[in-house]
Amino acid sequence: MHEEKAVILSHFQAKILLDAGSLQQVEVSPDLGLTKITADISKDGVRFWEGLAIAWDDLKTIAKKPNTVFRISADSIEKIQAISDLTGRVFSLYPTEKAPTMLVSGLLMHRVKGTDPLEDTKWKVKAISPAKGRVLDTATGLGYTAIFAARTASRVDTIELDPAAVEMTRQNPWSKELFLNPAIVRHQGDAAHVIQTFEDSAFSAILHDPPAIGLGGDLYGKAFYQQLYRVLAPRGRLFHYIGNPKSPSGKKTTQGVMKRLAEAGFERVAPYPQAFGVTALKR
């Protein structure tokens, strides 16, 4: 029944198991809340299925690590993280009560305050609604944007720069569809270079969700915006995630982004505060 070679846990699941008390069995998720199973409890620990168990002391350690996701296999317990050979940045999964987000050099890749990564993603995709035809997702991350867009689009091209990010995505249970959905086409490389390989007016909509400007400055530049304009079809819609528009840095960045998008040719450039970004249209 269980083909998984490992269990993916965070402090949320660990606390459920530790609170099970004198029960003989407990319902818990082996994949960060995606599915649930019935695990067996003993004095030694918790057995998820034949050949895979975890001791109480290890669960206590996991429960004390609120910013970390762990991979438990038959012979090891490891933090899900990686150091990029490309950029030197540290990538890791960051748990929430639902799907995790990714932490890159200490920066969260989704909003989690008052929301969660999936809800955050839904707002971004809604900004280009309806997502039809061929859609460009300029920064894959954990793949949530591509996954949601592919529910209505006929094809989604998504670009990821860093192999370390891809490794996090492969280990994230909530990202499985990114690798299984034939409507999603993954590209590896710098978006500023990959976008030059696409034809003019190739996409009916674009979701531009770059890292913070300190990590992906080129993706906020006029030259890149001109490429976005080139590959977007007439009457196509762009959503550009920026960050909290009420913060001093977010307000300043938003003003600069809107100015450069207009200079690149976009029209009806307007704030879209529900998703912490701006929208624009190509006539």
Image (cartoon, helix red, strand yellow):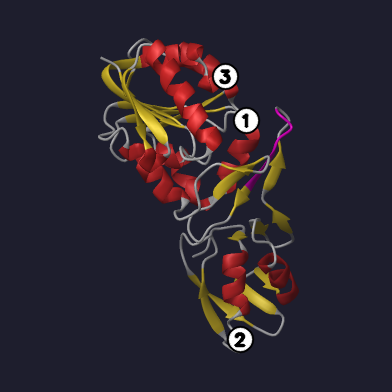
Residue displayed at 48% across by 46% down: 176
Report which residue position mark 3 lands on. Answer: 218
Q: Earlier in the sequence, mark 3 or mark 2?
A: 2
Q: Magenta span has 216?
A: no
Alpha carbon distance from label 3 to label 2 = 53 Å
Depicted 127 relative to depicted 72: above or below: above
Q: Toward the viewer: 64 or 74? A: 64
Q: Residue furthest front?
A: 248
Q: Residue at x 32, y 35 (%)?
A: 127
Callout 3, which amino acid? Asp
Residue 7 in sight in this render: yes
Disc 2 packing (10 Å; few <14; some 14–19; many ≥20): few
Residue 114 % position (x, y): 45, 56
Q: Secondary structure at mark 3?
A: helix
Cα separation, mark 2 vs mark 1, equals: 43 Å
In the image, what residue type sits under mark 1? Asp
Query: Could you tell whether 37 is left or right of 125 in the image?
Result: right
Q: Position of residue 256 (x, y in %)?
A: 48, 22
Residue denoted by label 1: 162
- The residues colored magenta run 87-92
Residue under label 2, please give it. Answer: 21
Say which label, 3 or 1, has the lower sequence index: 1
Disc 1 crowd, CA 10 A, few/some/many (<14, 14-19, 20+): some
Mark closer to the observer (3, 2): 3
Q: Which mark is residue 254?
A: none
